Amino acid sequence: MSVSSDSTCIHNEDDRLDYILSCPKQLAYFQAYLQDIYAHENLLFIEALSELRHENFPGNIEAIVMRIWKTFLAHDSQLEINVYGKEEINQYLEAHKWGIISKDEAIRLFSDAEREVKQFLNEKVIEFDKIFKLQNSKNMEPNLEFKKKVVIIGGGFTGFTIASILDPMPRFHVTLIDIKDSFEYTPGMIKLLVRPEETSSLRVRHDAYVKHGRVVIGYAKKIVGKGKFVVVNNETIPFDYLVICTGSRYKSRLKSFDTSSLYRLSEIATEHKDLKKAKSVLIVGGGLVGCELASELATHEFPAPYNFKKKITIVEANSTLVKRSSSRRQKNALKYFNSLGIKVVLNERIANWSYTDNNTYLGSSGIVYRGYDKVFLATGTSPCSDILESDSGIDFESCVDHWGRIRVKPTLQIDHWEYDHIFAGGDVTNVLEEKTGYAATLAGVCIARNICRMEKGKPPLEQGSKGTLPAPLKPLHGIESLGGIGRQQLGSLRKTFSFLNPSWAALKYFDEKEFLHIVQGETKSSVSAAVGRKPKSLDLPKDFKDQCCIQHYQGKHMEQLSPPISSGSSVRRRLYDKSSITNLSGSEVLSKSDLSSNDTWNCTCASENENEDTMSLQEQTIERNWKNRAL
């Protein structure tokens, strides 16, 4: 069944839904619409299944399956969906909770529920398109003939930095591909989980800073066409420059792969609730992440009736905590944990575990760790370099080391004699550095400068030369006396003269809000000491300036909603405001409540002649039909 030509050029219902899922702006509006009729859990279920399909690590697959079950299908789940085969799914998972479920088995198990939910969502898409008047995408396709096409895979710190720098430049058209709809400032996630009342962690929708290019939500599968095209969502996208900044996977959920902020918020709220109730916590991994989490839990007093002291155990496979730190810091960290009453087990590798058997873990020494109320896996990362390991017909095998990290030159170009137009940065690379958001940001600035230099016919720079900052070998933040755990505070003298020392400048400015301002060029030039010298803006070549008209657009397939009018239908914007910046504040985590009812956004209806009363009746009919379906 085709949809209205006023709303989209896509005629297949599933294609229309898939397109909404790939476009941050439309996904946000459709999600807000579903929230207004209390049906958003269906969309989140489809997003969760997409994450399952693209996960290849067996341990993570089991965790994703259990999360889908507990979030959407188990009795009294937080976002329960109503599908006919729910009882059969619950019975199957209960019967197989002692075994391992493969990805194929899980997809088959959820297939009927997925089909039913998609049918429901396709009906909601038709209703959504009738209420929201969308401009025809054919009229908004940009002319890329004179622009250099930069494709960025990954919307973390490196991708965010490069896109923020290059997107405003007339010379480039930026396409950002990410599995999420937003950039998330991850350094504050541990504090957000433990003490949300003191924390706000920013999520910024990608189209808030990619204003002239295009954002695609999806999984980049492979590079084809002699290194000139990338395949994503069954679409082949051309590029002149490619940046791979896909980051790394975490066994814990401290780093998000959730498509939408709403699904992410539901998880954080659940994790915080579990932490409050937990009397005993097991942390597997004694690196910086595990140690910071243990410290936060041990030093924080939860409100009554949860203000009891928690029993915290941290298990580390190496002979010391924070292995990559100096011996002095390692000793200080152990001394600090002993003073907090944290039990530290060293030289113990977790050999096996079960997500279903009451959080049971078997150590290499033979000790069984069981009965903990809450368990966190903080055992390091696994780089997401799958795109170079896929069967694309191009020999990238030599570009990936035995740890799965992408080999790069000092210029951050991939280490291949033929593809000097392909860069990589951040956690996914083999650069010797402390893998942090700050290090990834410095890599992003270096890559942006090198792309600009290559456009000007100049050789690319090695990171750390001519105004670019070198890869940091130790964490930016860290209190020496506590073994590098916690956040170092600058004295007034160092704050005043922070411009004299890159480390001081970074400590002063690299936080949630200032980071966004620095990268997007909204701070004083002296602050560039924190991230390195950014490139000057590049205009179109002189020969092309007279041949084309530079216009502001939002790229191919980037539909815009019509301007609001007073007679339009009101839809609450629960997680997205007009600036596309989402603040996952602690109050939202604590209350899990919606934003204020006066945070509304009026949208033009399909017919401008319809009055408010008519639309109100139409919305009542839509909601009544939805309730009759019991979905």
Image: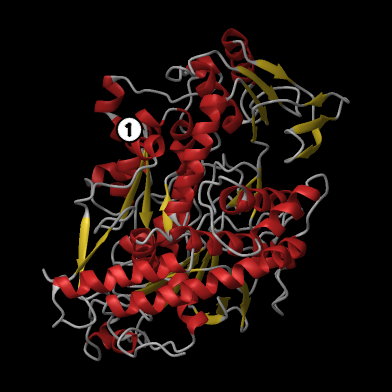
Foreground residue, 539 or 49?
A: 49
Q: Element under label 1?
A: helix
Residue at x 51% of width, y 70% of height: 242
Among the 4 quarters of the image, the one containing residue 232:
bottom right
Residue at x 66% of width, y 40% of height: 380
Find residue 176 and report its horizontal and vertical position in percent. Answer: 44, 67
Find residue 255 and report its horizontal and vertical position in percent. Answer: 54, 45
Residue corresponding to mark 1:
508
Q: How is the image coloured?
A: secondary structure
Extreme residue in the front direction: 628
Extreme residue in the right direction: 366
Is residue 138 in sight in this rendering? yes
Is residue 457 in sight in this rendering? no
Foreground residue, 233 or 457?
A: 233
**Residue 616 as seen in the image, left or right of residue 124:** left
Foreground residue, 387 or 128?
A: 128
Q: Is residue 137 above or below residue 290?
A: below
Q: Amino acid at mark 1?
A: Lys
Residue at x 42% of width, y 64% of height: 627
Q: Is residue 428 above or below residue 396?
A: above
